[in-house]
Image: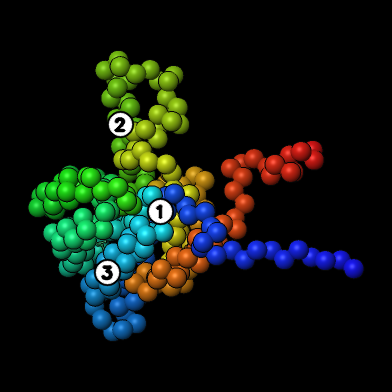
């Protein structure tokens, strides 16, 4: 008689928590439309949910969370919608209980110099105020584009080559990585709710070996339980980074 060893059920308790998660907070507009509300209501609900998920990531021990709040392409949206998103950002930044009391460190990535000046000031203040936090580090991507980030890095390196402080031959992948908007470990896991299967210019350089997870749930409805499900699924993935499984390698 053959006995099959029962596989231990994977729960969050016996899971590896990804060190760095990226989230494309998509589906706010459809969430609002389903409720016959203006799109701004969807973004407001999305911004509330961002707080819930950031708090939850902090609780379960995620180290870095990068969220896509506003892309370099989002300026194409109607002015009222863009202004609405900027207002949500202002509101979030003005209330330091959102991060300070939570022991969350807040950081921003993107081309921030074109944002309204008061938002730039609020960002500086929030980054400073949360500097001592030892918990989750949230990177909010605002006026962020992955390709834009690569161009930015190439320009920085070119400047050094031009002024003679760096040699073209010394340009490596690591040098490129070091010149991106941020230099934390690459995201291991990227989540996109709302039924779209695109990267949409998010973390183009850093996602080379990320695992992707998609879901039909719209961002404002994406719950901590959904995140648990995603992380459990992440734990079932076989990450080979271009290599082969150790056992497979031995057989050959
Ligand atoms: C994509 O959904 C979402 C955005 C372009 C904006 C995301 C912004 C927030 C969640 C609020 C940011 C503020 C804070 C404080 C985090 P969509 O509008 O494209 O949705 P749709 O595809 O259903 O139309």
- Please tell me in which quadrant of the rendered image residue 181 appears: top left
Q: Which element type, helix, strand or loop, lies under badge 1? A: loop
Badge 2 density bin: few <14, some 14–19, many ≥20, Cα 10 Å: few
Q: CA distance from mark 2 to mark 1?
A: 32 Å
Badge 3 density bin: few <14, some 14–19, many ≥20, Cα 10 Å: some
Residue 103 in sight from this viewpoint: yes
Q: Which residue is mark 2?
A: 155
Question: Residue at image x 21%, y 55%?
Answer: 100
At which x and y percent is residue 24? 38, 60
Disc nearer the start of the sequence (2/1): 1
Q: CA distance from mark 3 to mark 1?
A: 19 Å
Q: Which residue is mark 3?
A: 48
Of tags 2 and 3, which is closer to the observer? 3
Disc nearer the start of the sequence (3/1): 3
| Residue at the bottom extreme, as displayed | 36
Q: Which element type, helix, strand or loop, lies under badge 2? A: helix
Quadrant in the picture for the N terminus: bottom right
**In the image shown, does 209 or 79 lie closer to the viewer?**
209
Question: Residue at image x 50%, y 56%?
Answer: 212
Q: Which residue is mark 1?
A: 62
């Amino acid at each position: 008689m053959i006995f099959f060893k029962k596989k231990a059920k994977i729960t969050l308790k016996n899971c590896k928590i990804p060190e760095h998660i990226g989230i494309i907070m998509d589906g706010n507009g459809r969430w609002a439309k389903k409720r016959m509300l203006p799109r701004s209501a969807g973004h407001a609900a999305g911004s509330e949910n961002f707080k819930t998920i950031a708090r939850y990531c902090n609780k379960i021990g995620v180290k870095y969370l990068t969220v896509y709040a506003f892309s370099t392409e989002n300026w194409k949206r109607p002015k009222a919608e863009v202004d609405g998103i900027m207002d949500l950002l202002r509101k979030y930044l003005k209330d330091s209980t959102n991060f300070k009391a939570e022991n969350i460190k807040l950081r921003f990535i993107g081309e921030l110099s074109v944002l309204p000046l008061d938002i730039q000031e609020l960002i500086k203040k929030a980054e400073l105020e949360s500097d001592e936090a030892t918990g989750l580090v949230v990177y909010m991507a605002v006026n962020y584009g992955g390709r834009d980030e690569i161009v930015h890095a190439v320009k920085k390196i070119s400047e050094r080559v031009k002024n003679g402080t760096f040699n073209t031959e010394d340009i490596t992948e690591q040098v490129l990585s070091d010149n991106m908007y941020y230099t934390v470990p690459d995201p291991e896991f990227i989540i996109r709710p709302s039924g779209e299967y695109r990267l949409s210019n998010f973390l183009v350089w850093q996602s080379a070996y990320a695992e992707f997870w998609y879901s039909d749930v719209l961002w404002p409805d994406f719950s901590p339980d959904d995140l648990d499900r995603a992380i459990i699924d992440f734990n079932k993935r076989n990450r080979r980074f271009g290599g082969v499984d150790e056992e497979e390698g031995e057989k050959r």
